[in-house]
Amino acid sequence: MIFPVPLELGEIIERVRAFAEAGADAVAIRFGALDGFAERMSRFAARQQAVTSGPATEAGGPESNR
């Protein structure tokens, strides 16, 4: 499934969780242009880990996947 507009990080986390709960074996996420890719991917990984393992530890507010 491809979403036509950038989504907020929290919304991406919720959609990934919904796919996992529905039985998805894998979910692909496009982190956008190369410029800033690593930062967006790291923020997603940190938030996803916090959601699945305990309280959120990431500083800052929601970020888009742009």
Image: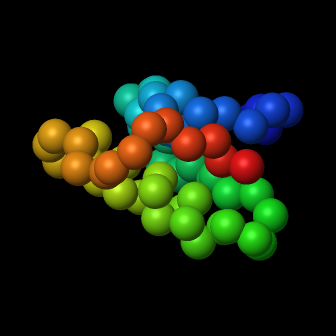
Q: Please indicate, yes or no, whether residue 65 appears anywhere in the rendered image.
A: yes
> In the image, 12: left or right of 48?
right
Q: Quadrant of residue 34?
A: bottom right
Q: Between residues 48 and 57, which one lies in front from this camera angle? A: 57
Name the residue rendered at 40%, 45% in the picture.
60
- Rendering colour mode: rainbow
- Examine the rendered structure and indicate whether residue 59 appears above or below residue 17: below
Residue 2 screen position, x and y as percent: 78, 37
Name the residue rendered at 47%, 64% in the picture.
42
> In the image, 44: left or right of 63?
left
Residue 11 screen position, x and y as percent: 53, 29
Q: Quadrant of residue 39?
A: bottom right
Most distant residue in the right direction: 4
Name the residue rendered at 63%, 53% in the picture.
28
- Examine the rendered structure and indicate whether residue 58 appears above or below residue 13: below
Residue 7 screen position, x and y as percent: 66, 33
Q: Between residues 55 and 63, which one lies in front from this camera angle? A: 63
Q: Between residues 66 and 52, which one lies in front from this camera angle? A: 66
Residue 3 screen position, x and y as percent: 77, 33
